[in-house]
């Protein structure tokens, strides 16, 4: 097995301390990182060599690491200012759905490919004698996308036609038929639902923990290391070619022979700008944090759900209101505090009722807001009348509130690929609320790009070129 060539304070060493010569396929001998060939001031920091350095330990970063480890003999370092699930990943609802996706959109092929890879992953877990429900929180619940008006029912019927044409099993149910499937759900006489039986849900924290454990199995081979609670602070740039060659963290220097990948979610923009400010070249990735609340509640005994639920308004975030402080003089742009709430509901692997979902622009604020929490609960009660018989305060006693910052791009597409004019610097960010669903497809695409392989789906819609890095 080919192993990572580290350079620690000028001494070439394996992770187990034994000396060896460079053994990475295609890699060159490690250069002294204090030489004038690189632009940064490392001082006496420890210096380590890897093939790939990933910044961000959410589901995107960890699945990219997994893809590298399983499909190449390259080495990976993963860096995070906090640790796994510290961002949007750990706050998500866990939908691996196609029901609310849009066939023939720029994201459709990547979404479909990624769902396929998730299903193959679960099959591998099952084939090894393990339980996906226990280890991943994986449940094939099917999804119900619901509406309450004749107009929404018509839109749902049209969506079923599009999904069916795209090869997705889907069926429209009238209000009465849907009520037989989900007696606890009320959509009115004119309402209905689009049912997609093959949609699933997963527990993001369990899935991340499982993937991380499998990645760590490569540590003994010198191919995988984690550097958590260790923020990246500077890029390492070659003075010869101008390429990004690695990163300096708060504690050490990590050199990336083949690529440095930014997968830092909502923090990608501010992180890159801070790290690049000393490099005298423009580098701007317009990813904005979009705050979301989820309520994890003790499930009322009178409420049972058999499927994952979502109202059709979620697709366009149509239900909007404005928070009370939107007119504050401290707010430069009042639209940053516009709140969108749409009903989502599911029962998680522990039997809790999970309700969402909110979207708002509020910077990097991660504090729960009563007005948002109440709006989510009130919206959910319109579809789940049993909630009207229960106090939110009482249900929260056995639960909690999740706050996450989704990495939002204004065109609705993630940014995946090399930065123009800096080919060794790659981006994998901007998935907003779909990072969990698109993680496996994104990882496959990124690694194919690193290896100069043809990508399985068209990568052009996600290219940073002309969308950012201006």
Image (spheres, rainbow, N blue to C red):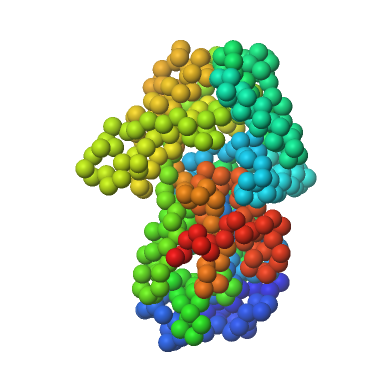
Report the quarter where the C terminus lies: bottom left
Report the quarter where the N terminus lies: bottom right
Location of residue 100 by image quarter:
top right
Location of residue 424 by image quarter:
bottom right
The picture places residue 242, in percent across and down from the top left corner, at 48, 79
The picture places residue 413, in percent across and down from the top left corner, at 55, 50
For the residue pair 185 and 86, the one nearer the viewer reads as 185
Q: Considering only vertical position in the picture, is 259 above or below 148?
A: below
For the residue pair 422 and 353, the one nearer the viewer reads as 422
The picture places residue 415, in percent across and down from the top left corner, at 54, 57
Identity of the residue drawn at 60% across and 56% down: 461
Q: Is residue 38 visible?
A: yes
Q: Considering only vertical position in the picture, is 159 above or below 441?
A: above
Identity of the residue drawn at 70% across and 36% down: 163
Q: How many marks?
A: 0
In the figure, is residue 234 to the left or right of 140? left
Q: Residue furthest left?
A: 329
Identity of the residue drawn at 48% across and 26% down: 297
In the figure, is residue 190 to the left or right of 170? left
The picture places residue 372, in percent across and down from the top left corner, at 38, 31
Identity of the residue drawn at 41% across and 17% down: 391
Q: Considering only vertical position in the picture, is 71 above or below 152?
A: below
For the residue pair 214 and 346, the one nearer the viewer reads as 346
Q: Is residue 184 visible?
A: no
């Amino acid at each position: 097995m080919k192993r990572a060539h580290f350079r620690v304070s000028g001494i070439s060493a394996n992770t187990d301390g034994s000396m060896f010569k460079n053994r990475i396929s295609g890699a060159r001998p490690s250069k002294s990182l204090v030489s004038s060939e690189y632009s940064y001031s490392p001082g006496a920091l420890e210096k380590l060599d890897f093939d790939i350095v990933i910044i961000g330990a959410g589901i995107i970063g960890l699945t990219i690491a997994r893809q590298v480890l399983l499909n190449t003999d390259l080495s990976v370092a993963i860096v995070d200012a906090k640790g796994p699930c510290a961002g949007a990943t750990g706050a998500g609802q866990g939908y691996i759905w196609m029901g609310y996706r849009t066939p023939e959109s720029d994201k459709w092929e990547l979404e479909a490919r990624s769902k396929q890879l998730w299903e193959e992953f679960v099959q591998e877990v099952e084939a090894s004698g393990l339980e996906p429900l226990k280890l991943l929180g994986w449940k094939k619940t099917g999804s119900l996308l619901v509406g309450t008006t004749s107009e929404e029912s018509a839109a749902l019927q049209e969506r079923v036609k599009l999904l069916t044409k795209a090869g997705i099993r889907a069926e429209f149910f009238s209000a009465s038929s849907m009520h037989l499937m989900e007696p606890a759900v009320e959509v009115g006489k004119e309402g209905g639902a689009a049912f997609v039986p093959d949609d699933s849900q997963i527990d993001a924290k369990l899935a991340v923990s499982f993937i991380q454990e499998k990645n760590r199995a490569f540590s003994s081979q010198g191919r995988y290391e984690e550097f958590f609670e260790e923020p990246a602070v500077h890029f390492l740039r070659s003075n010869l070619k101008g390429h990004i060659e690695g990163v300096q963290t708060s504690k050490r220097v990590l050199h990336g022979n083949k690529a440095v990948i930014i997968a830092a979610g909502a923090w990608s923009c501010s992180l890159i700008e801070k790290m690049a400010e000393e490099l005298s070249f423009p580098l701007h990735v317009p990813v904005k944090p979009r705050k979301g609340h989820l309520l994890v509640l003790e499930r009322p005994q009178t409420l049972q759900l058999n499927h994952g639920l979502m109202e059709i308004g979620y697709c366009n975030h149509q239900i909007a209101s404005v928070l009370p402080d939107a007119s504050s003089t401290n707010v430069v742009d009042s639209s940053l505090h516009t709140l969108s709430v749409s009903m989502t509901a599911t029962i998680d692997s522990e039997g809790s009722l999970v309700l969402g979902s909110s979207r708002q622009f509020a910077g990097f604020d991660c504090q729960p807001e009563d007005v948002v929490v109440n709006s989510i609960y009130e919206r959910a009660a319109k579809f789940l009348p049993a909630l009207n018989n229960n106090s939110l305060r009482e249900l929260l006693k056995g639960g909690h509130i999740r706050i996450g910052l989704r990495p939002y791009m204004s065109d609705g597409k993630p940014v995946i690929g090399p930065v123009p004019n800096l080919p060794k610097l790659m981006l994998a960010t901007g998935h907003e609320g779909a990072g969990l669903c698109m993680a496996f497809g994104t990882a496959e695409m990124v690694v194919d790009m690193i290896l100069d392989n043809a990508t399985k789906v068209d990568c052009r819609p996600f290219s940073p070129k002309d969308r950012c890095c201006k």
